[in-house]
Image: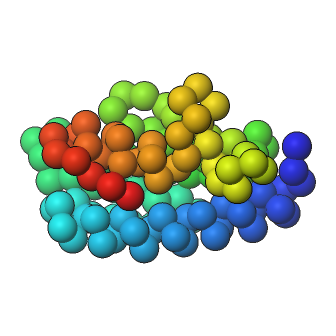
Amino acid sequence: MMDEREFQKKAEATFDALRKRLLEVGDENGFEVEGGSGKLEIEFEDEDETRFVISPNAPVRQIWISALTTSFKLAWSDSAQAFVQEKTGENLNQVMGRILTEKLGKPIQV
């Protein structure tokens, strides 16, 4: 397992890139992206005021996504050089694309 400093470095770089991409996608698809305290939140203007939360979990060296009444947990993969969901093999952008596509009902690529 990587040490906490290495995890923080990889997580910060991943979050910066993800935030930039989500801001672009959000402008095109009508959702807001907010970041602070080391996490990202995606807010939808729907009747349920749906919110997705993406946050690092340093003790277990994972990035967690809370969305669509599910928790997605992604760990660093040296071979993929990305945070990956073990169950599906998807990287963070692929998971985000899938859950945004499901929420918005149209193909979204992150």
Quadrant (top left/top right/bottom left/bottom right) for the C terminus: bottom left
Residue at (46, 59) in percent of width and height: 40
Tell me where residue 38 appears, x and y as whole percent.
59, 63
**Is 11 positioned to the left or the right of 2 in the image?**
left
Tell me where residue 36 appears, x and y as whole percent.
50, 68
Tell me where residue 73 appears, x and y as whole percent.
59, 36
Residue at (54, 29) in percent of width and height: 88
- From the viewer's perspective, is residue 1 above or below residue 5? above
- Report the number of numbered marks: 0
Seen from the viewer's position, the closer of residues 69 and 19 is: 19
**Is 33 positioned to the left or the right of 61 in the image?**
left
Tell me where residue 25 appears, x and y as whole percent.
28, 65
Seen from the viewer's position, the closer of residues 23 and 50 is: 23
* Residue 62 visible at all: no
* Residue 23 visible at all: yes
> Residue 31: which quarter of the image?
bottom left
Residue at (47, 53) in percent of width and height: 93
Residue at (53, 40) in percent of width and height: 90
Quadrant (top left/top right/bottom left/bottom right) for the N terminus: top right
Instruction: Describe the colour scheme in one phrase.
Output: rainbow
Q: Residue furthest front?
A: 79
